[in-house]
Image (cartoon, grey):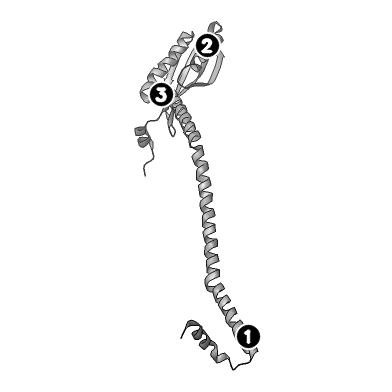
Amino acid sequence: MNFDAVNLDVFRPLIPFPTIIKVSVLLTLVVAIFVGYYIFIWSPLQTSIEAEKTQVEHQRVILNKNERLASNIPKKKEEYKKLQTQLIIALNMLPKKSQIPDLLEGVTWAGKDSGLEFSAFKPGSEKVQSIYAEVPVSLSVSGTFRQLLTFLKRVGEMPRIVDVKNLSLTMGKEENLEIKGQAVTYRFVEGGEKKKTSPQR
């Protein structure tokens, strides 16, 4: 028995039925085949394709983002180098603890070279912040207004940060000014000091 004979045998029970029934059964089989194909093959395949498209689009977005980041790497490296340079400059302007006495001595010499006479120069208590500490010094000097301006100019030209503030001026003897105020410098807080000054838990 060949393949065609087998197919005919399958449909042989339909031969006695009217043509309309045969056509209806045939159409039903065809529709069932198409519905089954759609439900079990076509629809899952389309869902899989859509999922793959979504994944591809997601990967494309990530790729574009990474390409933009990669194109910015030279610029970011340059910015990092500039920040490092600025940090070094800033740290050089903040003396270490061991350098504070020399710095304060430099402030007194700037005053004396300007012609001011010191009657008081008293360091106060430090105020430790996150990476730096304020080192206040109370000062009392006498001299002319020009000498005071020269002193402030020289302090401002010092490589370290020194802030002269809270000045009060009163007339003294021989037309000299009696000047009281505060010179505040800032020093870098080193790693060991941070541990000591951090609150205990």
Q: Nearer the viewer, mark 2 or mark 3?
A: 3
Q: Tell me which amino acid carries mark 1.
A: Val
Q: Nearer the viewer, mark 2 or mark 1?
A: 1
The disc, 3 or 1, on the residue closer to the chain's N-terminal end is 1
Q: Which residue is mark 1?
A: 23
Tell me the element at label 1.
helix
Q: Residue at x 54, y 90 (%)?
A: 12
Q: Position of residue 97 (x, y in %)?
A: 37, 25
52 up-or-down from 94: above or below: below
* Inter-mark Cα distance, 2 to 1: 115 Å
Determine crowd level at label 3: few under 14, some 14-19, many 20+ residues with C-alpha closer than 10 A. Answer: many
Q: Which residue is mark 3?
A: 95
The disc, 2 or 1, on the residue closer to the chain's N-terminal end is 1
Q: Residue at x 57, y 82 (%)?
A: 29
* Inter-mark Cα distance, 2 to 3: 23 Å
Q: Work out which residue is located at the far bottom of the displayed protein and give it.
A: 16
* Inter-mark Cα distance, 3 to 1: 101 Å
Tell me the element at label 3.
loop
150 up-or-down from 12: above or below: above
Answer whether residue 186 is visible to the viewer in this image: no
Q: Which residue is mark 2?
A: 150
Q: Tell me which amino acid carries mark 3.
A: Pro
Q: Nearer the viewer, mark 3 or mark 1?
A: 1
Answer whether residue 106 is visible to the viewer in this image: yes
Q: Residue at x 49, y 85 (%)?
A: 6
